[in-house]
Image (tube, grey):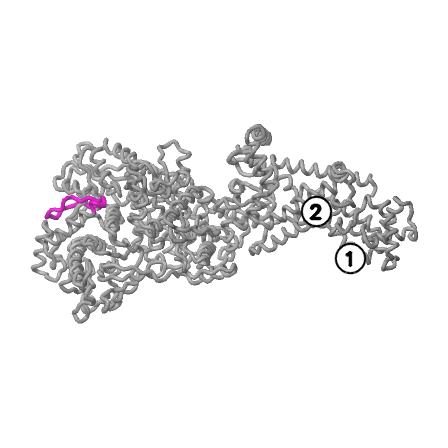
Amino acid sequence: MKYALFLGCKIPSALPAYEASSRAVLAHFGVTLVDLEFNCCGYPARNFNRYAFAAAAARNLALAERAGLDILTPCMCCFGTLRHAIRFLGEDAELRSRVSEALAAEGYAWSGKTEVEHLLTVLARKIGVDSLAAAVRSPRTGLRVAAQYGCHALRPGNVTRFDNPMAPTMFETLIRAAGATPVDWPRRLDCCGDPLHQANTPLSGRMTRAKIADALESGAEVICTACPHCHLRFDAVQAGSSDASIRTLLYTQLLGLAMGLPADFLGL
Amino acid sequence: MSPALFQTALYASLALCSLGLVWRVSAWFRVRIGPDARTVALSQRVAALLRGGALALFSRRVFQLAGAVFLDLLLQRRLFANEKLRWLGHLLILTGFTLLLLMHALAAIVTAKLFQGYQPTLDPYLFLRNLSGAMVITGVGLLLFGRWRRQTGLPQARRPMDMAFVALLGFVLVSGFLLEAHKIASPRAFYRMSDQFIGSTDAGRLTPLRAVWASEFGVAFDDLKLPIDPRLLEQGRELHRSACASCHTKPVSAFVSYPMARVLAPVTDLLDTGRADAWLLYLHVFACFLGLAVLPFTLMFHLVAVPISLLVNAAAPNRDFSLAGRASRRALALDACVRCGICDLHCSVAPLARYLGNLGLLPAHKLQATAALAGGRLLGCEDVALRAADGAFLCTDCGRCTAHCPVGLDLEDLWEAGRGDLAAAGLPSPAQWVQAHPALAWAESLERGPAEHVDSGPDDLLAPLSADRRSFSRCVQCQTCTNVCPVVAHSMDSNHGIDLTPQKVMNLLRLGLRDLTLGSRMVWDCATCYQCQENCPAGVRVADIMCELRALGVRRLGAVRSLRESS
Amino acid sequence: MTGARRDSCDVAVIGAGMAGMATALFAAERGLSCIQVGNPGGILFASGLLDLFGVHPVAERRLWRSPYAAIAALAREQSDHPLARIDASSIRTAFEIFVAALGAAGLRYAPLGDRNRSVLTSIGTIKTTFGVPLSMVAGVDALEARPPCLLVDFRGLREFNARQIAESLGHRWPDLRHRRIEFPGTEAAPELYAAHLARALESRQTRERTIALVKPLLGDALAVGFPAVLGLARASEVHAAFEAGLEMPVFEIPTMPTSVPGLRLLGALETAVSARGVRRRHQASVRALAFDREAGTAALDVEGVPGVERVVARAVVLATGRFTGRGLTADRGQVRESILGIPVLQPASREAWHQRDFLDPSGHAVNRAGLAIDDAWRPLDADGKPVWPRLFAVGSILAHQDWMRSKCGSGLAISTAWAAMEQVARQLRGTGAG
């Protein structure tokens, strides 16, 4: 298995542990990751200019296509954004032709071959839960884990094709593969608050805190994430608060620990 | 040149340079970037520097400092990692320039003291001077070539002053070489020397020596018959050994000037008559003095700012700075940036800059805007300011500019501070400036606004869903979207509740009142979690429409923004 | 663009209303692989109450205490009604499995029994139904015994007015009282939405604050009724906490759609099918359906995004509903089946669709229009033959029924889904695997 690794903007600068742990875990399962210099997935431009958003996303897809690779991203926002762009380009001929022009000006083209996968879809569907479970050396038995699904990977399900958007099971299955116990928490499919962090900080904070309180009340010891935005939002809100707090752990860290990978490989 | 004139000019330019340096360096403590920097007094900033410097020098950090001097400053490892060609060019300039400065400009106080029997016309000095000059010219050429080769399609940031300085530098080098070339070929110079050291300017008497100097030292005598008799040469060499050899080696080693001298040979007579040696010297020296005087206000100020910036970085563990330290560091960054544009190359949103036609997104341009804003020059030109604000708020803080910056600037800190300044200057992010007024007020402005201003370009590409009735006509106002909306849910306990619910936004669209939605809190507070869209029983793409309304709002409300804010 | 996505399964279910969800659930229970296409649709508008069969004959508006006796009567008088084709034990099994699956997914129902029950509605009327969520069952008891009882509502929750209910029932239930309280933390909000309150009550703190507000108001009440906002995903725990905190039976009254019970039902059904491996295609529709008679498979073009997905299935179940579910469409002259244009049993002309009086108790002929089926639940073509040997139809798209007036919507959906799935399984066994 070989993918172009799309780290997005957040991971290298703010959460290098996610990159390190993803590489460590994926390498164990024989996944080759190729580094291309991608640009921003296009997400910030969605609220600004639809054409610029689609063109920026398509440029990434074109970069991967030129390398003959599909994209693997550990970021749920990048994942959803790229999938959205594929939708918009697919349904809007005028947009597609303008974007093609912009790409051609730089010598790029995108014919639609590139597939976009999230880290979790690769782990669950391409590598397979059984292979993950077989690699576990020190299962995290008894650890009660709340899965943070992340809106932009989950919904809308017809665009992201991540899991059943109303009642997903993938993340819990992956947590079980690491030997831990998934916790059912009412707000597991809620927004983490990150998209509103800039636009409306108090509202964003209420959303994050509601999730943290819910996870704690549901008996979770850890919120497990698979998106830098969710992860950093939980950490940031808890950093400046005296409320009860909960540990956050990236899924690749949870799995890596269960596989017996050294903690410093996982950025822990 | 009279020593008095030389001295006066030298001291004048040195004085100007020093004043300039003081002024520029003081800016590191005066210039305030970022709202937090406004809370720190100048004295605190100076104290922070002194304290930080002392802590670093008298602790084990001193090894880090030494490492930084060696690796970052002398070897330029960050530049090497980024662009080998540029690194080579830069190293050539740095080495060549240093050699020229010490060995040539300051020959009397450096080289002559260190090396006995120093003469500028002796090898290896003759050769080394040419080599140094050639290194600088090659280096500048490489940098210009690198800049030209980088066909990104986007203009690169530059200041006119910097380009003027490069031209001045080129002029100094070319005039220097010309001067040397002319002096090699000049019979006039020969006679001046022979007069001084042999006591004769008689052409006939000096013929053997002239033969030697013509054939072996490139002097362009126009009255010597060729080929030269070997016996005459033998005679001349005798004289040369006794009178000239101690100060002159064959100028062939001046591998730039000597070929130039040969080229100039046919016109040497003319140049001699016109006293080219004198005015070339004046031009060369005064160009140097001019360069020296204006140095603090040109690109070359980075010679001061960059080393200090690198040392400051190395001095603080984990780049952990106090507020006062950060404030000074931001001001320092404005000077340490050499506009190399490497950040632009790696900028994650550079493609957006291209697609939006807004250079304000690019880091090197953004730095100039930040400097302009700090200097109070940005707000004068509204258009530039608005574009700078758009660019600043589309930055994703990916940190690639910082990671690649060859001089190690913490650009993310600068961008964040810059955004704070923009917001304070009335140029906040779209979500903020839109929400400063209620939706109804915006709708009124749209109505009053000049039509051609508001309706610039078709909406279809920007907002095809909200422009197409079919995308929301199926809405039955069942309130599912509102019931599953976390934004509405989390606005229950707030005095800043939302104005419309998602279902009401859809209803306004159904009623053809799209302009009423563009400034609404609901539209701008939408978290794009897609619960509404996923749960909609009628298949309305609610969240997609919300995104569109924001994009449309940025443009349409942006067009009447000045109208709104002046009212 | 990314065009040719493909997938295959034993059973493709078209529709995600009650009948579609029940079909997918039963298919998965039988170990058949299943792909289900459709929007949340009708379930959101459900009340959480599961009707089985309440009114017969429709024209007389006669209410039955025993749904099974009513169905037996129906079978004697109108044998082509879909429910008349199914024996009582199958209906019982279908309901038990359905309700058990909901319970496992967090939405618990009171034991079903054999009788219809009377439930208070949010407009003060009384509704006859069969399956009652555990959180509402104390209301059934209270309505029967009519003890002193308090109804509580929340300022700002416009869809539920306790005073209105108490006033319209006052003559029959004099000890029914009402009080309005401020939902904790919503003092500044002009308007509240049921689902948001339900989710807020899942936090222990909000729950305890609410209970503390109600407790002093109880007086001599022996039961307390609330709008149906007591929790969403955690409804059972929230309801139990209210009963423990108030130390008496607590019941919910379903609110107007879109209601919390509808969201709960949707959540539980999605959870149930998802846990059983049903592959759901949300916000998608079937653009074309074609049969490969040689291979014995059906090909569905599912219009999702991006592009179109080709689903190959060995059997297909139409659970597309009627007009609002867009299973049927009506044009100027006639009613059509939307996907394949299967002939719809209907009045001869448009004039005969409706009675002169819109409120005519016997209902309208067009409400009984729908697909004609054979004994194996297969829709019939113009020649009276199955359209395709493994194309089935369930739920309200079937002819000869008027579920709204008979109060048999869920009963029709669940029972026909069960009966049809028996036939699907039999047919698939006949073709080899399955």
Chain hosting mark 1: B
| Residue beneath the point at 68% across and 38% down | B20
Residue B153 falls within the magenta-colored stretch? no
| First-in-chain label (2 vs 1) | 2
Residues beneath discs 2 and 1 located on the same chain? yes
The answer to whether C207 appears left or right of C427 in the picture is right
Mark number displayed over residue B263: 1
In percent of width and height, residue B218 lies at: 81, 53
Q: Taken as a whole, is the magenta stretch helix, strand or loop? A: loop
Residue in the image at 24% along x and 60% along y? C323
Residue C83, position as x, y percentages in the image: 13, 57
Q: Quadrant of the N terminus of chain C?
A: bottom left
Q: Which residues are magenta?
A: C102-122
* Amino acid type indicated by mark 2: Ser
Rendered-image quadrant of the C terminus of chain C: bottom left
Packing grade of label 2 (10 A; few <14, some 14-19, many >=20) is: many
Q: Is residue B36 above or below residue C52?
A: above
Residue B459 visible? The answer is no
Taking the image as shown, residue A165 lies to the left or right of residue C369, namely right
Asked if residue C107 is among those painted magenta in the image, a careful observer would answer yes
Give the percent coordinates (x, y) of residue A155. Answer: 34, 50
